[in-house]
Image (cartoon, rainbow, N blue to C red):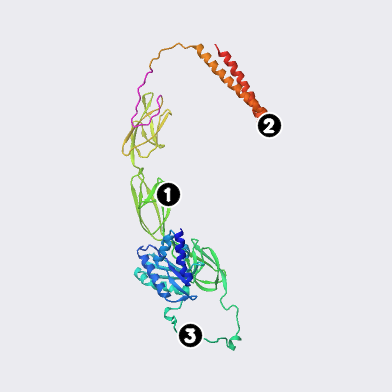
Amino acid sequence: MIRGVLLLVFLLLPSLAFATKRVAVLEFRGVGIDSNALPVITDYVRSGVLEEIGNQQIDDQDILVMTRENMRDMLTQMGKSILDCEGECEVETARSIGADYVVSGEVTQLGDLFVLNIKFHETTRGQLLAMEATRDDDLEDILDEAKESGAKVVRKGLELRSRASVSDKASTFVGGQFGYGEEDRNADWLVDQGRAEVSVLFKSVPQGATVYVDGRFICSETPCQKYVSEGNHEVRFNLQRYTDEIEHVNVKKGTVVTGSMTPLFGTVHIVSEPSGIQMYSSDQNWGRTPLTKEIDPGIYTLQIKDPCFETSGYRFQMKQGGRQDISLSLTHKQSAVKVYAYEHDNAVDGLVFVDGKRVGTTAESVAVPLCSKKVEVRTADGKMWSGDLSLKEKQLSTIEAYLSGKEEVNEVYSFQPPVVQPLPMKKKKVNISLIRNTTSVIIGGVALASYAQAYQSYRLFFETSDRNSAEELYRYNRMMVVCGLVLSGSSILIWD
């Protein structure tokens, strides 16, 4: 922790000492894009930013573009990765490494079209300064355009002059007095020469989209209501995992702008008979049926891994914004039972039920699902027997059911243990007098203990000052005295 703080301070000192503005270009994200192409696109954008800035300054301060290695070292000391952050925390990440400005973006594949979106933020206030979007049907062309797009977004965000028009620092400076002519001083001055502003309500489906008007950030989350100048404007709605929705509107009083977002993902809904089955896709656990899940476009193979059902699967293709409703009918793994019913060792006929469903009759081999739990036998005269099942796949289990006279069993093979006769024992003459006298002595001892407890409670009764405790001790003393008297009398009567 201390090393990370020291490193951050060390890296920030040059910015303070030499009045340097830092620009961080974060790693670009991608949807449906080869991950190997993203670092290349990021480098192209960083190259365009670097060339555009050149030797220009902001408020008489030099501008420094941070390298990937520089940012990685700083984030590593903080226990973070350069790929950890996306969305709103991009600005926070740039701020934590001492950057004054941050360039970020994403590449999205929409069918055969590739879209590169680049954003440029000022980190102190989190303000979006500029955006740049590039579309092409060839990823290689996107690479070529990434450099120029990086230069454009910085140029617009910092309002830099084009490098071709940057004045040479060595050119001659001519000074002198300046002022207004007589005609300027007498000119009419108007307070408001711009267009009127009106309140506009922004909504999106689904909610939570970020809103940009003419490329400028205006609202972080829909629904929201903001002031916008009257006239024609381009409104863009942006939401993670949805395509950007662009609306061209003529703003006037009472205008409501609604963006209907198209998802970059699809939705799959899976039901099964029976329900509660665990579903897997590429060994990833999706949960138990019925289930609804949002997934990226692509081809998926569902797998059913359940010990009670035959192995099966389902293959489907999910398209962007699509929906798949899947209904699966599963096949139970099979086993079999054969039930013999007895009443007082006599065979009886009856109906056999497994998990509440009639499957056959006694002494008949019937196929049942492997994971069946309960077997029952019901006879015509209303008698019934039930037991638990523990079956093996494709094996016949024999069960003996005793309706009365014997314990209910549920085993593949029943076993009756032999009857063991008790060994004969010699009768001995019992000394009744000795037993009575011994009992009398024991009872007398208990009586003495009761008297001792009564004496102890009697002493405490006079020592305590609490009324409630005194009453409790009084009742206890009286009970011990009565017990002592009863036990003493019993001891005398038993003594022979």
| Residue type (three-letter) at the residue carrying disc 3 | Phe
Q: Is residue 12 visible?
A: yes
Instruction: Name the N-terminal-most of marks 1 and 3.
Output: 3
SS for callout 2: helix
Q: 383 or 259, which is in the foreground?
A: 259
Q: Is residue 167 left or right of residue 254?
A: left
Callout 1: SS: loop
Q: CA distance from mark 1 to mark 3?
A: 77 Å
Distance between mark 2 and mark 3 Cα atoms: 106 Å
Amino acid type for the residue under numbered disc 2: Arg
Q: Is residue 106 visible?
A: no
Closest to the observer, 314 or 181:
181
Q: Residues within 10 Å of mark 1 (few under 14, many from 20)?
A: some
The image quarter in which residue 135 lies: bottom left
N-term-proximal mark, 2 vs 3: 3
Instruction: Give the magenta-colored segment's residue range.
Output: 405-422
Check disc 3 and report the residue beneath it: 173
Q: Position of residue 8 (x, y in %)?
A: 46, 64
Residue at 33% across, 40% down: 334
Return the residue found at the far bottom: 182
Mark 2 surroundings within 10 Å by alpha-carbon count, few (fewer than 14), some (14 through 19), many (20 or more): few
The type of residue carrying mark 1 is: Pro
Q: Which residue is mark 2?
A: 467
Lower position in the chain sequence, tag 2 or tag 1:
1
Numbered mark located on residue 453 in the image: none
Q: Quadrant of the C terminus?
A: top right
- Specify the quadrant of the image occupied by residue 370: top left
Mark drawn on residue 290: 1
Q: For residue 176: magenta? A: no
